[in-house]
Amino acid sequence: METEPSAAEPRPQDGANAYQAEPGEPLSEAVIAAIAAESSFDAIELADEFGPLYDSIDPTALDSLFHTTGETARSIGSVTFEYARYRVTVDQTGCVALVDLR
């Protein structure tokens, strides 16, 4: 897992397909939805085929990484990890960028 500071507007990496999480949607759910939309698998099949998301990243930590509370401001940056044959980059705006590793 990598984290990077974001200096400018977040943009998907070259060759990446982007998915925007809905306001209030947990980022872990957005990752699964993005991969399901790009692949031939639904959410249940993803876990059956590639194992659960938590084998690659802690979903609770991912959800809380860029979560804004009344006491803290939203973190700035992005996190990158691999899951289900994709390089997944999630940033503070809720953008999920996927690069197919096949």
Image (cartoon, rainbow, N blue to C red):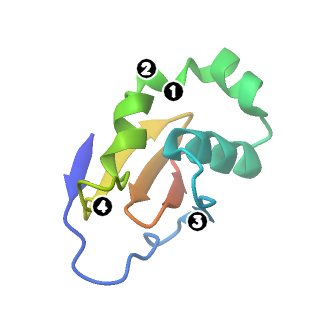
Residue position marked by numbered label 4 in the rendering: 74
Q: Which mark is residue 86?
A: none
Q: Distance between the Cα atoms at labels 2 and 4?
A: 25 Å
- Name the kind of residue labelled 2 in the image: Asp
Pointer 3 or 2: first along the chain = 3
Q: Which mark is residue 55?
A: 2
Do the numbered discs 2 and 4 sit on residues whose CB atoms are within 8 Å?
A: no
Q: Nearer the viewer, residue 58 or 86?
A: 58
Q: Nearer the viewer, residue 28 or 12?
A: 28
> On residue 18, which mark appears?
3
How would you rate the neighbour count of disc 2 (Cα within 10 Å): few for under 14, some for 14-19, many for 20 or more?
Answer: few
Residue at image mark 1 = 53
**Relative height, residue 99 to residue 85 (above, below):** below
Q: SS at mark 3?
A: strand
User: Which badge, 4 or 3, is on the more N-terminal residue?
Assistant: 3
Badge 4: residue crowd in 10 Å (few <14, some 14–19, many ≥20) = some
Q: Nearer the viewer, mark 4 or mark 1?
A: 4
Depth order, front residue of 9/73: 73
SS state under label 2: helix
Amino acid type of the residue tagged 4 in the rendering? Arg
